[in-house]
Amino acid sequence: MPEGHTIHRLARDHRPLLVGRVVSLASPQGKFADGAALLSGRTCTRIEPYGKHLWYLFEGDLSLHVHLGLYGKWAVGAAAPPEVRGQLRLRMTAGDAWLDLRGPTACEVHTRADHKAVLARLGPDPLRRTDDGELAWQRLSRSRTSIGQLLMDQTVLAGVGNVYRAELLFRARLSPFTPGRDVPRETWDAMWADLRALMRNGVKTNRIVTTGARAPVRREDAHYVYRRAGQPCRLCGTEVRTELMAGRNLFWCPTEQLEP
DNA sequence: GGCTTATGCGCAG
DNA sequence: TGCGCCTAAGCCA
């Protein structure tokens, strides 16, 4: 489930397998053959997540840039890697570990300049301790675009996807259709703080749970509104609604979530 | 086993 | 605005 928390979790899980080690790269599918050859045999120095992007830095100022998109997935294991089958974009091996990447939107070699260029167009990432919501506020508080769309705009905020969007707005009791510039400052401050807490919990548990349900959380108890169209709102019983907003399914409760 | 759906995003038009 | 990427889980039979 690749929203920002997934990417930060992957970084955390992959670091002990790769950082400080010589890594071999291959692209059985062939689509990344040149890049794999270029990076193979180098030592991985650092793994850096930012929003939904992930960089594996190697010596020589080159990095592997991965964006999972909607379908991308990593599989990881120790000892003998499984027999290659299907479309395997990238296999990395280091020591005992193997890491297989399938279906990513982006898997490419970045120079330091490429890396910087991507970072330059991303908004603050709630999962980065030193980032703060001020930059996002400057953008959204001047925009007539709906808060529902702004939250998904990676140049405003990095790492939020469709699940966090829907759940954050519900928890703030804010209508997704509210123009950015009509969002009260204190509402935004509370949303930023809430988002940080939600996403940190997402990294820890490797899933998105926003209802405060206690573990073990059943899938149907994990969210307030996301993918609950037609079901009763957990607070007021009103049917949760859905509608396409900028090509993505939006979910909200029309009773609980009002414009300010 | 087949069909539907999806947490993303760049591109054509 | 709609399509294509390309994968896997969830659902049905």
Image (spheres, coloured by chain):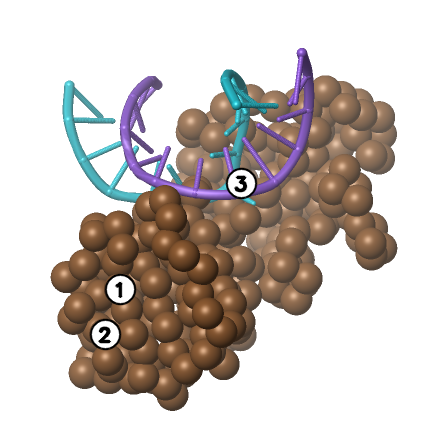
Chain colours: A brown, B cyan, C purple
Name the amino acid, label 3: Asn
Residues marked 3 and 2, same chain: yes
Where does label 1 land, which residue? A26
Q: Quadrant of residue A21?
A: bottom left
Q: CA distance from mark 1 to mark 2?
A: 8 Å
Whether residue A81 appears in this view of the structure is: yes
Chain ID, mark 1? A
Front position in the image: A145 or A226: A226
Disc 2 is placed on an element classified as loop
Q: Nearer the viewer, mark 3 or mark 2?
A: 2
**Residue under numbered circle 2:** A40
- Label 3, on which residue? A162
**Mark with earlier residue (1, 3):** 1
Q: What residue is drawn where x is 75% and y is 32%?
A: A256
In the image, is residue A208 above or below residue A125?
above
Query: Which residue is most to the bottom?
Result: A20
Residue A146 location in percent, x, y?
A: 48, 35
Q: What secondary structure is marked by label 3? A: helix
Q: Could you say where residue A188 lies in the image, as x and y percent from the top left?
A: 59, 53
Q: Amino acid at mark 2?
A: Ser
Mark nearer the viewer, 1 or 3: 1
Q: Is residue A194 left or right of residue A156?
A: right
Q: Residue at x 51, y 46 (%)?
A: A161
Q: Earlier in the sequence, mark 3 or mark 2?
A: 2
In this figure, what is the number of numbered marks? 3
Q: Are marks 1 and 2 in contact (CB under 8 Å)?
A: yes
